[in-house]
Image (spheres, rainbow, N blue to C red):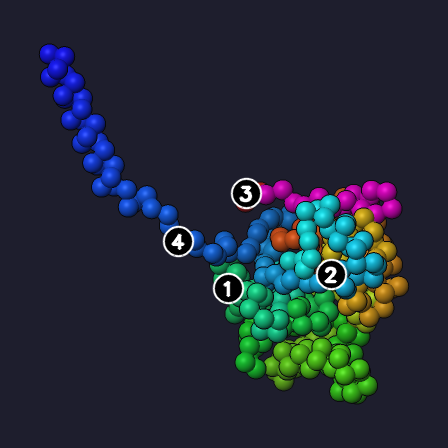
Amino acid sequence: MTSKFNKHVLASLVAAAAVACAAGPAFAAAPMAKTPAPGYFRVMLGAFEVTPLSDGTVDLPVDQLLHQKPEQTRAELAKSFQKVPLETSDNAYLVNTGSKLVLIDTGAGALFGPTLGKLVANLKAAGYQPEQVDEIYITHFHGDHVGGLASNGQAVFPNAIVRAAKHEADFWLSEEVMNKAPADKKGYFQAAQGVLAPYVKAGKLQTFDGDVELVPGVRANTGHGHTPGHTTYTVESQGQKLVLIGDLIHVAGVQMAHPEVTIGFDSDEKTAAAERKKTFDAAAKGGYLIGGAHLQFPGMGHLRTEGKGYRYVPVNFTQMR
């Protein structure tokens, strides 16, 4: 009996091994997908739905761009487990007020290469279509914020009104100002003029002066310094508040702790640093959310004062309720 039992066990093991060998190819290593999840996030702000949208990332030599010693930048980034070139997010924000669909900034489109220009795909993945956007509010006219407005000379958001600060539009859309600009800056003007042209031609570019409510619950605030007409936008609903700060900060790993450090993209460094401090102090004191174009996606969080600078606390992942 023992012999028969052993033979039976052995036969079972051999059979199991044969099955395992036959099934082996099903467990072979799968090819790597090399694609991330769609770049959108979603939170409720009172009665408003806010959807941060990723336009992608771009590698920046921030040790050469920030106005401090390069080795100091590299050392401070290392504390955040980052290095140069720094993979930098480019974010936009879609606000559904229930009556209006408002997009704040549009990403880079085709202006900055293949690692950016993802906004429309991510907007669609988030459940919306470009044709549904009612209004677009621009923080400033640098290419990584307006490039997504047009593709091949055609408006990407055909039904949208584009709004921006008058001072910003007057500066970047002026042929006279462009002609006086240094040769290495003329491309900024040409890019902005090119992507805005379909909206200008259609009479869909509208400008505003100063601090003004554009639709109920969304207000423009002057935030000059980074560019002549740089603007931030405050979104408020049912006592909850979010301030979309545009380019008040580029490198959180350095500028949160050292808000006095400016970057080569700033047109007026002193004013840009002062505006950052004023806006960040108010956010830390008020305890409300900020959203940044170049904070790590989804680019939303709170600020807390820490020493002479700030601590950035990213939003917690949340389910929609």
**Residue highlighted by disc 1:** 121
Question: At 74% from the left edge and 82% from the top edge, which residue is drawn?
Answer: 186
- Provide the residue span drawn in magenta: 302-317
Q: Residue at x 63, y 63 (%)?
A: 58
User: Closest to the observer: 242 or 53?
Assistant: 53
**Residue carrying label 2:** 62
Q: How crowded is mark 1: few (under 14 residues within 10 Å), some or many (20 or more)?
A: some
Whether residue 8 is situated above or below residue 198 in the rendered picture: above
Quadrant into which the C terminus falls: top right
**Of helix, strand and loop, which one carries label 1?**
helix
- The amino acid pointed to by label 3 is Gln
Q: Residue at x 68, y 47 (%)?
A: 81
Secondary-structure class at tag 4? loop
Closer to us: mark 4 or mark 3? Answer: 4
The residue pinned by badge 4 equals 31
Precedes in sequence: disc 4 or disc 3: 4
The CA distance from mark 1 to mark 2 is 28 Å
Q: Can residue 317 be seen in this view?
A: yes
Please tell me which of labels 3 and 1 falls first in the chain. Answer: 1
